Image (tube, rainbow, N blue to C red):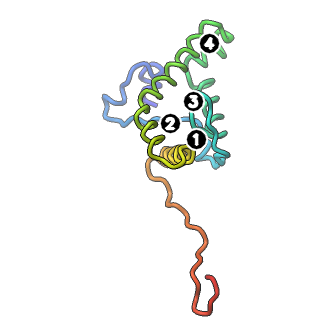
């Protein structure tokens, strides 16, 4: 909030100079806190793992919260130049993210029995930690199959 107001729309970072921690939030996290379920796991081309809730969050973030999206949608009536800049930035972000995670992805692919299931599990765990600020709720256990004294399953 500090950087958005005092920092001229986030162009200047005053918050870190004042000792305030950085928070990277998105609208998908907001939807999760509001109780919207994540839906099925999706593997999006070029973008990687996601779910319908986070896809909706990405659409809102890129249209209403991204300065280029706001300029392109509301100010310049989706001018061609802004679309080119926006897609170029998206492409560079995808390449940068892939490059940063290259070793981890290759290691996971080499060492997991089911790469798809392992990636899905890691994505969901990371996303749950992001939504709950690093302290996800305890995992729920399934039904007990203990046999009681009279041979009845408890």
User: Residue at coordinates 59% horizontally, 68% vertically from top-left?
Assistant: 142
Alpha-carbon neighbours of circle 4 within 10 Å: few (<14), some, or many (≥20)?
some
**Label of residue 25 in the image:** 2
Q: Give me the C-alpha separation between circle 1 and circle 3.
A: 20 Å
Q: Pick whichever, 122 or 17, lies toward us.
A: 122
Q: Which residue is mark 3?
A: 47
Report the quarter where the C terminus lies. Answer: bottom right
Q: Quadrant of residue 78?
A: top right
Alpha-carbon neighbours of circle 3 within 10 Å: few (<14), some, or many (≥20)?
some
Q: Which residue is mark 1?
A: 30
Q: Earlier in the sequence, mark 3 or mark 4?
A: 3
Q: Give me the C-alpha separation between circle 4 and circle 1.
A: 26 Å
Q: Earlier in the sequence, mark 4 or mark 1?
A: 1
Q: Are marks 1 and 3 in contact (CB under 8 Å)?
A: no
Q: Give me the C-alpha separation between circle 3 and circle 4.
A: 18 Å
Asked whether, in this view, residue 24 is left or right of residue 58, the answer is: left
Q: Are marks 2 and 3 in contact (CB under 8 Å)?
A: no
Q: Which residue is mark 4?
A: 83
User: Residue at coordinates 65% horizontally, 8% vertically from top-left?
Assistant: 79
- Which of discs 1 and 3 lies nearer the camera? The answer is 3
Q: Secondary structure at mark 4?
A: helix
Q: Give me the C-alpha separation between circle 4 and circle 2.
A: 24 Å
Q: Secondary structure at mark 3?
A: loop
User: Residue at coordinates 50% horizontally, 46% vertically from top-left?
Assistant: 122
Q: Pick whichever, 46 or 87, lies toward us.
A: 46
Q: Give me the C-alpha separation between circle 1 and circle 2.
A: 8 Å
Q: Are marks 1 and 2 in contact (CB under 8 Å)?
A: yes
């Amino acid at each position: 909030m500090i950087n958005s107001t005092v920092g001229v729309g986030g162009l200047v970072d005053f918050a870190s100079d004042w000792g305030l921690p950085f928070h990277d939030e998105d609208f998908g996290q907001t939807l999760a806190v509001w109780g919207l379920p994540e839906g099925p796991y999706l593997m999006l081309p070029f973008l990687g793992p996601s779910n319908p809730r986070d896809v909706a969050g990405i659409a809102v973030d890129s249209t209403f919260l991204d300065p280029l999206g706001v300029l392109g949608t509301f100010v310049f009536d989706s001018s061609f130049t802004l679309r080119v800049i926006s897609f170029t930035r998206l492409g560079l972000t995808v390449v940068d993210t892939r490059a940063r995670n290259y070793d981890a992805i290759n290691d996971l692919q080499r060492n997991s029995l089911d790469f798809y299931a392992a990636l899905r599990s890691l994505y969901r765990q990371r996303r749950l930690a992001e939504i709950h600020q690093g302290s996800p709720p305890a995992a729920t256990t399934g039904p007990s199959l203990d046999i009681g004294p009279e041979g009845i399953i408890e």
